[in-house]
Amino acid sequence: MPVNKIKCWVEAARPRTLPVSVAGVAAGLGMTLAAGAGLKAAPALLCALFALLAQIASNFANEYFDFKAGIDRPGRVGPRRGVTEGDITPTAMRDALSGTLLAAAAVGCSLIYWGGWWLLGAGVVIMLAALAYSAGPYPLSRHGLGEVAVEVFFGIVPVGLTYYIQTGGYSLSVFVMSLAIGLLSANILAVNNYRDIDDDRAAGKVTEATKIGPAATRSLYLARAAAGVVMTLALWWRLGPWTLVFPALTLCAATALWRYLGTHNGAALNPALGKTALLLLFFAASFALCAAI
């Protein structure tokens, strides 16, 4: 495969946003360690792989179904869309979507060994959600529900499932952490939709940003980050007062990114997208590392 074609497929997977998948699993493992339970390496790696494959499948579905619906336009502000620009054929993207979903299903089924047969149903729901984000009779991404979907399926679901597979249990503390991860994850999509607000309005795509406007979107970005940090302070404190430096750094970085949103637009916002994803991973990985120590 030519190098430029590989680059098109890598871009279609949207690597800037992929840290969100690892972050949810990392937070679940951190809560496992905080609870005093030992880690099971194999299911931890499988959870991370499943999350990555499910997210890539969702990204492929978004590109394919947005193209089919005429939502994407050539020359858009955001990262180049391979199908819309003619770099990838619709058939190839559809096949890649199917293959990625099958791979995710195979990995997910392997987790039944540690979590039980009910995970089969959970996996089906996650797969359907990956498609429902962009497809079906009521695509969530086109009706202002994208951030809600992200909060659930990149926060509440992966943190809770990872913790359950590791420990066989669940707790209010795990829910609090999962909600915080979901809020920070939603900010990644918020930056994406904030950047694309003009393109989306022109295409008739309804997102949170097109509904509430740029100023409110920026304010909500900071509010989500602050809420995610504040609601987990007690969890950090239990690990030791010294660990509070990490949520403090997270909030400082989020504030800097919020300011950046107010002074940049268009393609200049692409770095903010990646930095928001890395900030989420920093928050989750720091908690896991502190819990391990």
Image (cartoon, helix red, strand yellow):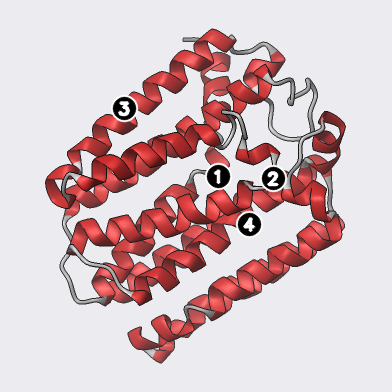
The amino acid type found where label 1 is placed reads Thr
Which residue is farthest bottom? 241
Which residue is farthest left? 113
Q: Bin the neighbour count of mark 1 within 10 Å (Cα to Cα): few under 14, some 14-19, many 20 and up.
A: many
Provide the secondary structure element on which disc 4 rests: helix
Report the residue marked by disc 4.
187
Marks 2 and 4, the one that precedes in the sequence: 4
For marks 1 and 4, give the CA distance.
11 Å
**Pointer 1 and pointer 2: residues touching (CB < 8 Å)?**
yes
Question: Going 41% across and 91% down the picture, which residue do you hit?
Answer: 241
The amino acid type found where label 3 is placed reads Ala
Report the residue marked by disc 1.
17
Indicate whether 291 appears above or below 107. Answer: below
Provide the secondary structure element on which disc 3 rests: helix
Question: Going 55% across and 44% down the picture, which residue do you hit?
Answer: 17
The amino acid type found where label 4 is placed reads Asn
For marks 1 and 2, give the CA distance.
10 Å
Marks 3 and 4, the one that precedes in the sequence: 3
Question: Going 59% across and 55% down the picture, which residue do you hit?
Answer: 186
Q: Bin the neighbour count of mark 3 within 10 Å (Cα to Cα): few under 14, some 14-19, many 20 and up.
A: some
User: Residue 103 has which mark?
Assistant: 3
Report the residue marked by disc 2.
192
Indicate whether 245 appears above or below 64. Answer: below
Question: Going 40% across and 41% down the picture, which residue do you hit?
Answer: 126
